[in-house]
Image: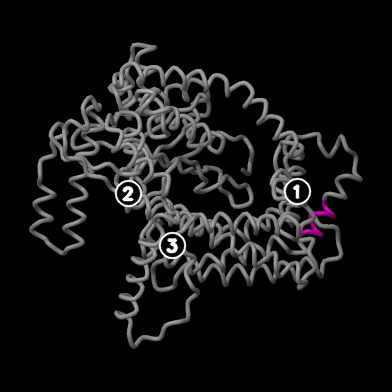
Amino acid sequence: MFHATFQGKHRPIQVLLRRSSIIRTAFVASSSSSSSPISYDEVLPALEKMQHPLGYAWSIASHLNGVKNTDELRKEYEANQPKVVQASMKFGQSKVLYDALSSLRTSWETADEEAATSSFLAAQRRRAVSNTLRSMTLQGVGLPVGSPEQVRFNEIKLRFAELSTAFSNNVLDATKAFGLTVTDPSDVEDVPESALAMWAEAHRRFLVKEAETEGDEEKKKEAEGMEVDAAKGPWRITLDGPSYIAAMQHMPNRDVRKKVYLGYLTRASEFTASEAEAKAEAEAEAEAADNKGEETKEEKAPIGKNNVLIIEEILKLRKEMAGLLGFDNYAEMSLASKMAPDVASVTNLSNLILEKALPAAQRELAAATDLARATGGPEYSESNLPKLMPWDTSFWVERLKEKTFDLKEEELRPYFALDAVLKGMFGLIERIFDVEVRDATGTVEVWHPDVRFFTLHDESDEGKHIASFYLDPYSRPADKRGGAWMADCLGKSEALGFDVPVAYLTCNGSPPVGDKPSLMTFREVETLFHETGHGLQVCTSLLPTN
């Protein structure tokens, strides 16, 4: 499944795009010619059947772009993305579909209210119709067909997709490009063993990659076989989450912390873009030389590696797009599909949180500063350092927590081996939801050897298989974007006959080092529980369609 999305003789995405266009045209023609009242089953379920093949294939492509990013995948993804966005907009801006849904909603409103909402299913159908109409409104269905406003709106949507992809790729590339090798043991004094082992392994992988780039097989084999010594180093600090956080919290050398902090802060900015763009240009020239004599189509100029410029363009386009739809600003447009009633309510809540949280944060910072002054030596004296710098705060707040609670986070790690955490979390899920979680790793295709697969079974219904999910637990800075998220792989759908949903749970936790298992931080455990909670919303839903 995961390797076939862009590959193969027939290029599935392009085939599905053509099919989607044909089916949409047929649906519009059929709906336009019908004079009889339209039913729910003739609209949303029919729409779902039309959109599923392309949507499912593209969701896999999008997922792989985030967790298994390669140059080949990027090229195909970026080539197909505008076509997929255009196909989506044609559905979202279909007047025929909008009128059909509006007619359906009107018929329900004029019918007996009690009958229309007498069942859970009826209420959910009304909500589905209402949400779809709202979504279509926000996709520009109200703009006159062919008008300058609609043309411009669609241009903005296409540009958004392009900018968003470029932004993510730039962050990933900048994260991969940074590395700081530390060789002096005094620089890592008192750093936890788990961080030292992670950094030492990162240095070995760096040597392997360097040898691959140089084409030196002997040097590569030597690096692959070298014994990693966490205590002696060398150590290589990178910008992926586990490595960066460990450096900020535990690296005693201020200069090293500063370099790592500034490296993280300036990823994909004007400070790093020039070098990255020069490298990309050189690679493009090399590819052009390799393809010399072959027919090539003209390509647009690349967006560039400076995400500051991308952010500025996105902000301008958001304001323009909101104006085209009649909103005063993008915040109003965003809230049109959210629970908060207006921008003022969001501002008031933010101010309320600030009012309560800021004094506590200031007290904690003052306590951390006092601790640094008292125990950090001359470099932290008030005459040398009027206030803690951003690359100091995490380090000294961690020391403050250790002093206050007489407990180091590293002491908790042995209790948080991934398998132990999963066992505890699954036990909790089983008690709350009366389900059984079974490890089915090895029964399905995965995109990386670390990925695991689980199935959920309803204990109250003779162990019926009700859902499945993938778990991708570890950081992989070479090809996986940072952060943590849950996404649908396959949604529950009455129309499509899918009653076993499948979810992706993606984290960026501390990976195993050598033969030692992954020992998680408490925050990583929290993140895993958080994303699993999102997954349970998909996996345990009683709705016939998610």
N-terminal of the pair, mark 2 or mark 1, is 1
Residue 26 percent across, percent down from the top left = 70, 70
- Classify mark 2: residues with Cα within 10 Å, few (<14), some (14-19) or many (20+): few
Relative depth, front residue between 3 and 251: 251
Marks 2 and 1, Cα distance to the nearest angstrom? 39 Å
Residue 315 percent across, percent down from the top left = 62, 54
Residue 160 among those drawn in magenta: no
The residue indicated by pointer 1 is 129
The residue indicated by pointer 2 is 448
Identity, as a three-letter code, of the amino acid under mark 2: His
Image quarter of residue 255: top left
Q: State whether the magenta stretch is mostly helix, strand or loop.
A: helix
Mark 2 or 1, which is nearer the eye? 2
Is residue 212 depicted above or below 445 in this figure?
Answer: below
- Classify mark 3: residues with Cα within 10 Å, few (<14), some (14-19) or many (20+): some
The residue indicated by pointer 3 is 5
Is label 1 in a helix, a strand or a loop?
helix
Identity, as a three-letter code, of the amino acid under mark 3: Thr
Is residue 381 depicted above or below 482 in this figure?
Answer: above
Identity, as a three-letter code, of the amino acid under mark 1: Val
Is label 3 in a helix, a strand or a loop?
loop
Marks 1 and 3, Cα distance to the nearest angstrom? 31 Å
Q: Which mark is residue 544?
A: none
Residue 100 among those drawn in magenta: yes
The span picked out in magenta is 98-104
